[in-house]
Image (tube, rainbow, N blue to C red):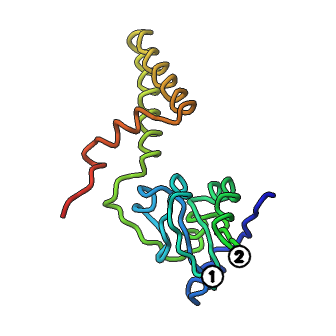
Amino acid sequence: MTATLTKLSPQDVHARLAAGKAMLVDIREADEFARAHIPGARSQPLSAFEQAHLAIDPEADVVFTCRTGMRTAGACDRLAARVSGDAFVLDGGLDAWTRAGLPVERNLAAPMELNRQVQITAGLLILTGVVLGFALSPLWFGLSGFVGAGLTFAGLSGTCAMARLLMLMPWNQARTA
């Protein structure tokens, strides 16, 4: 049986949260949540969803959210299985909430999301390889090929060497008080 999540508009979710009748569960990864999230949302990354203890008030509506709504749509079976009653999704996710002018807690001191760092780094390396390949020597095209092969391996294996390397960078280290 395929579970479904009922879509709710940002305004409807905001009203339910304000009335204390809903619990908002953000399924983005911790680094994404740290950068920006809806006030009162609980961080429960999808990557560790089944292992987590999700205390749910049976009287409250459970509303799941991510950045755009795509992750929640793709994981609706997993998400709805954790809720005994009806389950909901914030239609359009955090992006729609922001466009609606609703409050967002932002921490610009938090590092950029790791996935975006990987995309930027890979894109810059590929672009550098192409530019230098045309400008200096065709051997530089190998850099683009190497990065492309690494991204392919990351997609097939589920491990990303570039992400592991970026996690070691000083800007991604936890700051101590």
Q: Is residue 118 above or below residue 9?
A: above
- 155 horizontally vs 31: left or right: right
| Mark with earlier residue (2, 1) | 1
Q: Mark 1 sits on what residue?
A: 58
Residue at image point 56% right, 59% down: 67
Q: Is residue 74 above or below residue 153?
A: below
Image location of residue 94, percent across then percent down:
56, 65
Q: Mark 2 sits on what residue?
A: 85
| Residue at the extreme left | 177
Residue at image point 67% right, 67% down: 91
Residue at image point 68% right, 71% down: 88
Marks 2/1 in contact by CB < 8 Å: the verdict is yes
Camera-side residue of 138 and 70: 70
Q: Around disc 1, counting alpha carbons within 10 Å, would you say few (fewer than 14), some (14 to 19), or many (20 or more)? A: few
> For the residue marked with disc 2, what is the amino acid?
Gly
Q: Is residue 21 above or below residue 3?
A: below
Image location of residue 134, percent across then percent down:
45, 14
Q: Secondary structure at mark 1?
A: loop
Q: CA distance from mark 2 to mark 1?
A: 8 Å
Camera-side residue of 11 and 17: 17
Image location of residue 44, percent across then percent down:
50, 63
